[in-house]
Image: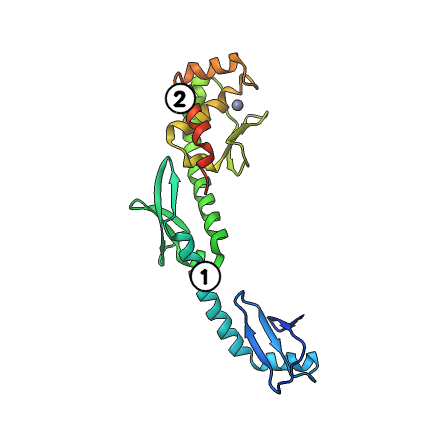
Amino acid sequence: MTPRKVRDIEYQLLPGSERTTTDIVIERDGTIVVRPPVNYTPEQADAVVESKRMWIYRNLAEWKDLNASAVAREWVNGETFLYLGSAYRLVLVSEQDCALQLKDGRFCLSRSLIEQGGTVAARQAFEQYFADKGAQRFAERVAYFAPKVGIVVAAIKVKDMGYRWASCGSSGILNFHWKCMMAPPRIIDYIVVHELCHFHHRNHSDAYWNEVDKVMPDYRERKEWLRKHGASLEV
Ligand SMILES: [Zn+2]
């Protein structure tokens, strides 16, 4: 097979067949495969593809429709997402200005978003949602706890932090993983206090845990919850 391109149509050119007409097929994975008569040059095959352009566009569009709705159906079927410790079912909605919102106890995801961008776009919409909501919540909770811990925070960032929940930079910047927003509020508070106390002790010494204990006497139970359930907080 030789890859070729006519205008915006990319296709795979097969060796010629004994037939007198050119076969154009759209495979299950969306690849366009062209088999010309045996004596055709590649340029002649290009010309046939060019002349069948409208047929190809129409069939490709049909293939995309079928495929996108299959992917969307598969992804949405029975999916639930955690937010602040509660599970919400996902529904696809056709008319919605934003990519994702929590409404009437359901996560409403834009149908066109998943049809155009697939599950990658859907996951991104969740990450963005958690990051936006996280920026608000962490700002509020840090403002509440920072004076109790007796420190001043320079800035807060919510982002993907890999396997870590949070970190505190030496310049007074706190980073939180957007995934924290899937945990219950009291666990989010523990994550906040945990990081704030690192401003006093950059380790997990007894002196450090003593600081945590002063602000959050029941921290052990919250810490244990995170240890047990942290791995289940996945999109
Ligand atoms: Zn720590």
3D distance between C-alphas at marks 2 and 1:
44 Å
Residue that protrudes farthest toward the bottom in the picture: 20
Label 1: how many Cα within 10 Å (few below 14, some 14–19, many 20+): many
Give residue 70's position: percent from left, percent from top: 43, 60
Give residue 80's position: percent from left, percent from top: 37, 45
Give residue 92's position: percent from left, percent from top: 37, 54
Q: Which mark is residue 68?
A: 1
Q: Amino acid at mark 2?
A: Glu
Q: Residue at horizontal 45%, vertical 58%?
A: 71
Q: Which is more toward the observer, 191 or 99?
A: 191
Up-down: is 37 above or below 77?
below
Q: Is residue 222 left or right of residue 40?
A: left
Up-down: is 174 above or below 42?
above
Q: Earlier in the sequence, mark 2 or mark 1?
A: 1
Element on which disc 2 rests:
helix
Q: Kindly identify which residue carries mark 2.
A: 221
Q: Residue at horizontal 53%, vertical 75%?
A: 56
Label 2: how many Cα within 10 Å (few below 14, some 14–19, many 20+): few
Q: Is residue 9 left or right of residue 197?
A: right
